[in-house]
Amino acid sequence: MTSTAQEAGTNVSTLESPGAEAIPEPKKFAMVASKGGLDEVYPILIMGSTAAALGWDVRVFCTFYGLDLVNKKRQKKLKVSAVGNAASPPPINGLEIKVPTIIGMLPGMNSVATWMLKNWMKSSNIPTFEELYDTCVESGVQFYACATTLGVMNVDMDDIVEGASCLGATAFLDFASEADVALFV
Amino acid sequence: MTVQMEADKVLDCTGLLCPIPVIKTSQAIKEVEVGQILHMIATDPGAPPDMEAWSRQTGHELVDNTEEDGKYLFWFKRTR
């Protein structure tokens, strides 16, 4: 195995101009996006855009609620849930008061939590969801809509953003099996 | 003491957090010729290890780096 790899390496480098190193095959990065909260898709976009900037081949399989990531109608309306997050920070910086869960259940609280996250991102100069998503697409991150989820959630391929294609778990695992990095979010 | 190096292009990432400095550096390195120097300035505390990793992953040489008045300064040489 090793000698074959070395031979292959030698062959490639002889094709290059003298002194130039052979460009290695890009690293492969497989991510499964299974959640659709704004706070839950941000890490995917940050990891994806960073890996693409390193020249990696990045592919994201959007399944279950993660399908919203590539759903035209829902992509721009992703929200942060006000309940179910034990780590949710106090609304005012420096105040060690947590908002009781029952307050999070009131109507409109998801919008408040979403507004808060967007504000933090803005004040930290982190791009918006739309900007980060566009950066991912422009830098070659490939998004896939899970075929089964399309059926389960009754979503038509017409509702999926341009550039994202429909894929089954088997085909994605085929890519993931060769990936250098694989994450489930 | 770091001698300030001549740069062919300067990229100011002051105030920007991950992943923007890395993305901007990846774009900016393509705007200099092979062998030329890109000078990047950042304030993100994650920048020193991030930019070293960026150099390892992309192969562009980190010629020098230093910290000055809370700013992290990097000089990269485009290698390919």
Image (cartoon, coloured by chain):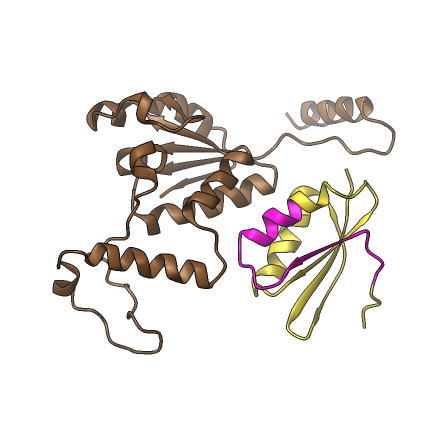
Q: Which residue is found at the position 34% from the left and 39% from the top?
A: A75
What is the quadrant of residue A171 in the picture? top left
Which of the two residues, A148 or B56, is positioned nearer the viewer here?
Answer: A148
In the rendered picture, chain B carries what hue? yellow
Instruction: Provide residue A60's location: percent of width, then percent of height.
Output: 42, 34
Is B17 part of what is drawn in magenta? Answer: yes
**Quick check: A92 left or right of B16?**
left
What residue is rendered at 57% in x and 36% in y?
A56
What letter labels the chain drawn in brown? A
Residue in front for this viewpoint, A133 or B5: A133
Residue at 70% x, 25% y is A3
Q: Is residue A11 above or below residue A105?
A: above
Q: Nearer the viewer, residue A31 or A65?
A: A65
Residue B13 seen anywhere in this rendered image of the structure: yes
Res A57 seen here: no
B67 falls in the magenta region: no
The N terminus of chain A sits in image quarter: top right
Q: Quadrant of the C terminus of chain A?
A: top left
Rendering coords of residue A10 (x, y %): 77, 25
Residue A49 spot, x, y in % from top left: 52, 43
Between A87 and B27, the one lying in front of the other is: B27
Residue lying at the far right of the rendered structure: A18
Position of residue A12 measured from the top left corner of the image (x, y, whole percent): 75, 24
Residue range corresponding to the magenta coloring: B5-26
In this rendering, the answer to whether A11 lies above or below B23 is above
